Amino acid sequence: MSFRILGIDPGLTRCGLGVVESRGRELRLIDVQVARTEPGDDPSTRLRMIADEIDAWITRLEPDAVAVERVFAQHNVRTVTGTAQVAGLAMVAASRAGIPVALHTPSEVKAAVTGHGRAEKAQVQEMVRRLLGLDQAPRPADAADALALAITHAWRAHAVGAIHQSGAAEQTGAQRAWAQAEARARSAGRARQVARGR
């Protein structure tokens, strides 16, 4: 059975949207695009335009899950505010459609697709190209990031067995590495909590 994920790389000027279909060990690109708004336009108009685009993608492509990049603190408050607002729109759109939504940090996504949590943008683009069997790397980076989010969630779903089929599909080497990296991260987090409690 196939599992379709909509990855959303939130941004007010450029919002990456990418849908990947996972069928067992296979990944297939369904669609990818970057929704754009003009920085000089009214913020409410820009947010409505992005919200309309996300709704249209959910209606047209009917994903089984939505994966959104988890917003993290940045020095540029204006940028992080717009990103957080769009991430919120994505979560609301998924919730209204009755679709599960998951948040993944940038380092989780980089580790999932490249094996390294501090990979450069170009590395992510190239690995997305390879994993999806594309002739060219998705551009701009927002498009590749959206697809990387979808791939990360597809692999996580297989790793933890949270997919719409009975039994766990055979994992690829990359999927096993992702599951192991996630387990190590959880262990490290628990160790830090114990250390702080002392």
Image: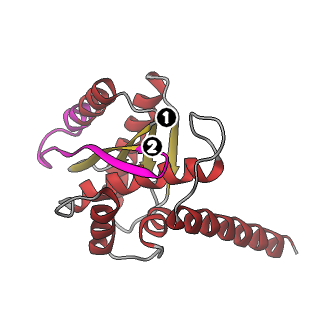
The residue wearing badge 2 is 23
SS at badge 1 = loop
Residue in the image at 46% along x and 55% along y: 152
State left or right for residue 58 relative to residue 136: right
Answer few, some or many: residues within 10 Å of disc 2's Cα (few below 14, many 20 plus, some between 14 and 19).
Answer: some
Tell which of 19 and 25 is nearer to you.
25
The residue wearing badge 1 is 1
Residue 9 visible, this angle: no
Gap in angstroms between the C-alphas marked 1 and 2: 6 Å
Q: Which residues are magenta?
A: 22-49
Give me the disc on residue 177.
Answer: none
In the depicted structure, whether residue 96 falls above or below residue 90: above
Tell which of 53 and 175 is nearer to you.
175
Residue in the image at 68% along x and 65% along y: 183
Answer few, some or many: residues within 10 Å of disc 1's Cα (few below 14, many 20 plus, some between 14 and 19).
Answer: few
Which amino acid is tagged 1? Met
- Looking at the rendering, which quadrant does residue 163 occupy? top right
Q: Earlier in the sequence, mark 1 or mark 2?
A: 1
Is residue 177 rendered magenta in the image? no
Task: Give how far across and how far down residue 55 sits, in percent.
Answer: 31, 27
Which amino acid is tagged 2? Arg
Tell which of 101 and 27 is nearer to you.
27
- Looking at the rendering, which quadrant does residue 127 occupy? bottom left
Q: How is the image coloured?
A: secondary structure
State left or right for residue 97 relative to residue 158: left
Task: Give how far across and how far down residue 108 sits, in percent.
Answer: 50, 63
In the depicted structure, whether residue 182 falls above or below residue 33: below
Task: Give how far across and how far down residue 20 sits, in percent.
Answer: 35, 45
Is residue 35 rendered magenta in the image? yes
